[in-house]
Amino acid sequence: MKKFISKTTALMFAFVLLTGSFAISAEASANAVRKKPTVVLIKAEWCGACKRVDPIISSLRKEYGGKMNFVVLDVTDEAAEAKSARIAKSYGLSSFFRTNKRKTSTVAVFKGSTKVFQTAKNYRRSAYVNAFNKALK
């Protein structure tokens, strides 16, 4: 005797399979992200120092983008800050964000969960290059 399943059951089964494989791939991707050093920039649109730091970090992102994660935590307003808190949490940076969210133009580099560099209002590209290279060792 042959058994048949409904289209709905088949679609639900396919969804579960696809969702499960996506979750595994997303988890694997998150683990790959955590293996790279992470550069964090806390900025706001109204911050003059941020306007000077941002182009430096943007150019370095082009140079180091494949080797490091770059995370921008925007604190321009309450909505941006709430979104940044969620982003910080996803990278395991909630404590860092809570402590530094009022220190715009702050740049930090993390190797795993260890902070290896932090500065603010630093406009010297060489300081970032040295910190990035150190984190990549």
Image: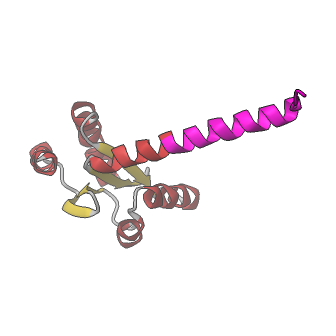
Q: Which residue shows up at 38% across the image and 62% down it?
A: 93
Q: Which residue shows up at 29% across the image and 37% down it?
A: 58
**Total marks drawn?**
0
- As drawn, 69 above or below 75: above
In the displayed structure image, the side of residue 69 where residue 14 appears, left or right = right
Magenta residues, start to end: 1-24
Q: Is residue 22 magenta?
A: yes
In the depicted view, which residue is nearer to us: 112 or 54?
A: 112
Q: Which residue shows up at 25% across the image and 34% down it?
A: 59
In the displayed structure image, the side of residue 45 where residue 66 appears, left or right = left
Q: Is residue 15 magenta?
A: yes
Quarter of the image with the N terminus is top right
> Residue 66 at x, y = what percent?
27, 33
- As drawn, 33 above or below 108: above
> Residue 110 at x, y = what percent?
25, 57
> Residue 42 at x, y = what percent?
36, 56
Main SS, magenta region, reads helix
> Residue 57 at x, y = what percent?
26, 42
In the depicted view, which residue is nearer to us: 116 or 6?
A: 6
In the depicted view, which residue is nearer to us: 26 or 131?
A: 26
In the displayed structure image, the side of residue 8 where residue 77 appears, left or right = left
Q: Which residue shows up at 83% across the image and 36% down it?
A: 9
